Amino acid sequence: MDHDEQLWAGVLGMYSHVENRLGAMLQRRHGLGLSEYRALSHLAGADGGELRMTELADLLGLTQSTMTRLLGRLIAAGYADRDTCPEDKRGAYAVITAAGRAKQTKARPDYAETLTEALDTAEDSAPFLRALRVSR
C-alpha cells in the first residue's frame, strides 16, 4: 500500500473502533442505536428542535428511506414526531419531543466519555489523533 492507502486504512480502523464502542455503549446503557442518538442530538441542537427530513438525513449520511425508518423508530419510542412543512406540504420535519430531549440529555455524558475513551484506546491511530487533538 502507498502512503495514502495506509493513512486511509488507519482512519477507517479508528472509525470502526470508535463507532463500535459508541454503538455498544448506547445500546447497553440507553437502548439507543448510534444513528438514533445522533438524530436526537441534531434535533436537540436545532432551532425549535426540528429539522427538515432531508436536512437530517444529510447530517447523518443516510438515504431518505433509511431516514424515514429511523424516524419511525424514534416516533414509536416517543422521542420524535413528524410534522409537515407549512410552506410546502410535501416537505416533512422531524421534531424532537420532551422525552427525546430527556433521552439525549441523559445519554450525552456517556457518549462523550465513551468517545474520549475510544479515541484514547485507538492505539494504531495514536500519532494521527495526537496531531488532530493539537489543532483544537
Image: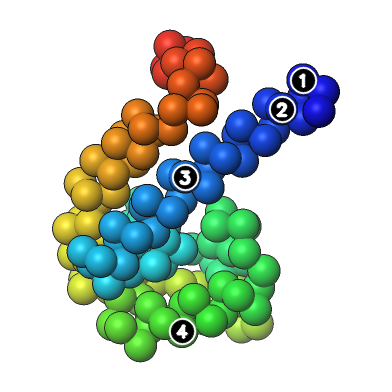
- The first of marks 4 and 3 along the sequence is 3
72 w.r.t. 53: above or below: below
Query: Which label was assigned to residue 6?
Result: 2
| Neighbourhood count class around disc 4 (C-alpha, 10 Å): few under 14, some 14–19, many 20 upward | some
- In the visual, does 118 lie left or right of 103? right
Q: Residue at image x 34%, y 60%?
A: 24
Q: Residue at image x 36%, y 52%?
A: 22
Secondary-structure class at tag 4: helix
Q: CA distance from mark 1 to mark 2?
A: 5 Å
Q: Position of residue 50 (x, y in %)?
A: 42, 65
Disc 4 residue type (three-letter): Gly
| Neighbourhood count class around disc 1 (C-alpha, 10 Å): few under 14, some 14–19, many 20 upward | few
CB under 8 Å between callouts 1 and 2?
yes
Q: CA distance from mark 4 to mark 2?
A: 39 Å
Q: Residue at image x 57%, y 40%?
A: 13
Mark closer to the observer (1, 4): 1
| Neighbourhood count class around disc 3 (C-alpha, 10 Å): few under 14, some 14–19, many 20 upward | some
- The first of marks 3 and 2 along the sequence is 2
Mark closer to the observer (4, 3): 3
Disc 3 residue type (three-letter): His
Query: Which label was assigned to residue 3?
Result: 1
Q: Quadrant of residue 42?
A: bottom left
Residue picked out by circle 3: 17
